[in-house]
Image: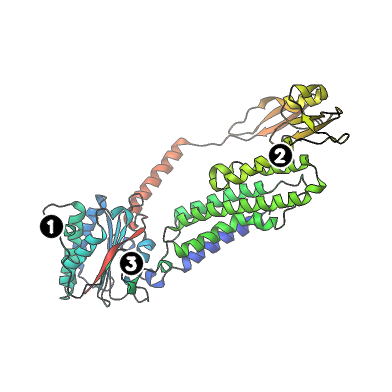
């Protein structure tokens, strides 16, 4: 798979588009029909069925605006005659909360109050950041003591106002108002099996698979990071063309760096109720650990299969290529650390285990760097000095027969000389001929010299034209962006997500 071709890039983009559509299709149509007050005047109350009067809506908006501006909580109130879906009110509230993204993103201080008239049900759904000040027991008590007595009389206006004021007093820690959490629960008649946070009765247990977190900027950002990281990783999986190793199913393993994290995120999302961008991070980590692990296993099996036809030096070269491409992965993927330690051990055996003399059958001894010098030609000593090639010399302990093995340093930037072919061709000077300006490109020359035969070569290169960036323009753009963000804050929610807490009561 070559990422430079437009067709491949288009395929990847279509894949991400497909995944985004999968999540979009999970949006409950009933959720989409609920009017968002932020997009209809910038308030906090959605009252499409006119369950309460306009005056009550204005009073609630005033209280909720104060809570929002003081960073106590961002509260959304939704009053519906019916939710027109097979979802329970709790599921509906959780899904609506995450669809609107109620609460400041950095505080996660959202609260959704949902009233469903035909089911005679009131639900509180809270974000993680507000659960300390508004725990499940407090939510339940507010419903039972402040709201349900009015709802049972058909007085939704006073019931909602009483509940909203009690929530505000609790969050503001108003000492003049009795705190419901400090007193025994006075359960309304018929409310004995009501729902409180995760203590939902078996008949109404929370269905994790029925609620979803929807992709936002974090999801898109991680997808872009995954695409870039995978492109880099794909290059790491390639590059074995200098050996005879051909990995079975190699293309499937290589391309899996793009699709496996997405597939794994989809699977995790069905069973674990956390934001989708966290799913993608977990899937990204686990899938890369699995892919690298499988790639190393399959490659090593091929090496072992071919080992009888190859020598230890060849095996060391292939293992060195694997390690040089993936060694940094052990810092990011600790689960792979033992795998790379094993590779290093095998490399050590392949290079340092004693050889047997082909002449007399006795063991051979590996010479030290100082002892081996008399066996090396001058250019070979130069290659060792430049660390482009490392030589090992083995001498028989019996007949003094000796062998010399060269190990290419694949991490070296030293090149092979075009004249003598020795790996001793290095850059000795880099100078600018014409400086680049905002109007014209520049040029430079790099001078290379062979440290063995003294062959020289000049290589010219182009210096890109300087970009004409204006700090004032940047400042202006930043200012307008800030202004836009400020103006849009009143027409959208804050980017929060549900913590799954809250309570529900029926009357």
Q: Is residue 433 left or right of residue 19?
A: right
Q: Which residue is mark 2?
A: 349
Mark drawn on residue 178: 1
Dot 3 crowding, Cα within 10 Å, few <14, some 14–19, many 20+: many
Residue 431 lies left or right of residue 483; in this view the side is: right
475 or 401, which is in the foreground? 401
Mark before the other along the chain sequence, 3 or 1: 3
Disc 2 from disc 3: Cα separation:
62 Å
- How was this image coloured? rainbow
Q: Quadrant of the N terminus?
A: bottom right
- Residue 60 visible in the picture: yes
Which secondary structure, mark 1? loop
Residue 399 x/y as whole percent: 87, 28
* Residue at the farthest left position: 176
Quadrant of the image occupied by residue 316: top right
- Residue 13 versus residue 309 in the image, above or below: below
Mark 1 or mark 2: name the one nearer the start of the chain. Answer: 1
Distance between mark 3 and mark 1 Cα atoms:
27 Å
Image disc number at residue 255? none
Asked if residue 450 shows in the view, the reply is no
């Amino acid at each position: 798979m070559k990422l430079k071709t437009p067709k491949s890039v288009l395929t990847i983009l279509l894949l991400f588009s497909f995944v985004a559509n999968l999540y979009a299709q999970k949006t409950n149509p009933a959720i989409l029909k609920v009017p968002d007050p932020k997009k209809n005047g910038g308030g906090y109350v959605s009252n499409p069925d006119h369950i309460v009067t306009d005056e009550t809506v204005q009073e609630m908006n005033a209280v909720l605006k104060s809570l929002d501006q003081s960073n106590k909580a961002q509260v959304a109130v939704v009053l519906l005659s019916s939710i027109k879906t097979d979802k329970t009110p709790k599921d509906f509230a959780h899904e609506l909360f995450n669809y609107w993204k109620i609460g400041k993103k950095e505080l996660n201080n959202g609260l959704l109050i949902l009233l469903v008239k035909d089911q005679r049900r009131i639900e509180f759904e809270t974000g993680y950041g507000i659960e300390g000040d508004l725990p499940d027991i407090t939510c339940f008590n507010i419903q039972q003591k402040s709201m349900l007595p009015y709802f049972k009389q058909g007085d939704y206006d006073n019931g909602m106002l009483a509940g909203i004021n009690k929530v505000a007093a609790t969050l503001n820690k108003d000492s003049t108002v009795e705190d419901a959490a400090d007193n025994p629960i006075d359960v309304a008649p018929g409310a004995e099996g009501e729902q409180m946070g995760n203590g939902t009765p078996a008949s109404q247990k929370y269905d994790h698979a029925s609620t979803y977190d929807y992709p936002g900027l974090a999801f898109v950002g991680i997808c872009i990071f995954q695409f870039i990281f995978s492109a880099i990783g794909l290059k790491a999986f390639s590059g074995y063309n200098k050996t005879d190793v051909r990995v079975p199913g190699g293309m499937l393993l290589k391309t899996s760096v793009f699709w496996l994290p997405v597939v794994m995120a989809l699977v995790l999302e069905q069973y674990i109720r956390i934001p989708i961008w966290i799913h993608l991070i977990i899937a990204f980590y686990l899938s890369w650990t699995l892919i690298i692990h499988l790639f190393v296993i399959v490659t090593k099996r091929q090496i072992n299969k071919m080992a009888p036809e190859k020598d230890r030096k060849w095996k060391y070269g292939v293992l060195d290529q694997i390690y040089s491409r993936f060694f940094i992965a052990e810092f990011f993927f600790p689960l792979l650390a033992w795998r790379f330690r094993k590779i290093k051990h095998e490399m050590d055996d392949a290079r340092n285990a004693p050889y047997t003399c082909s002449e007399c059958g006795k063991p051979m001894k590996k010479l030290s760097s100082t002892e081996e010098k008399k066996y090396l030609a001058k250019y070979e000593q130069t290659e060792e000095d430049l660390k482009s090639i490392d030589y090992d010399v083995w001498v028989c302990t019996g007949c003094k027969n000796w062998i010399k093995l060269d190990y290419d340093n694949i991490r070296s930037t030293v090149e092979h000389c075009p004249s003598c072919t020795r790996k001793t061709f290095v850059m000795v000077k880099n100078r600018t001929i014409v400086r680049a300006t905002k109007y014209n490109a520049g040029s430079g020359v790099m001078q290379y010299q062979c440290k063995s035969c003294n062959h020289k070569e000049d290589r010219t290169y182009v210096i890109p034209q300087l970009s004409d960036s204006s700090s004032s323009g940047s400042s202006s753009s930043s200012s307008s962006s800030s202004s836009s963000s400020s103006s849009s804050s009143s027409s959208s929610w804050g980017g929060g997500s549900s913590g799954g807490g809250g309570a529900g009561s029926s009357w």
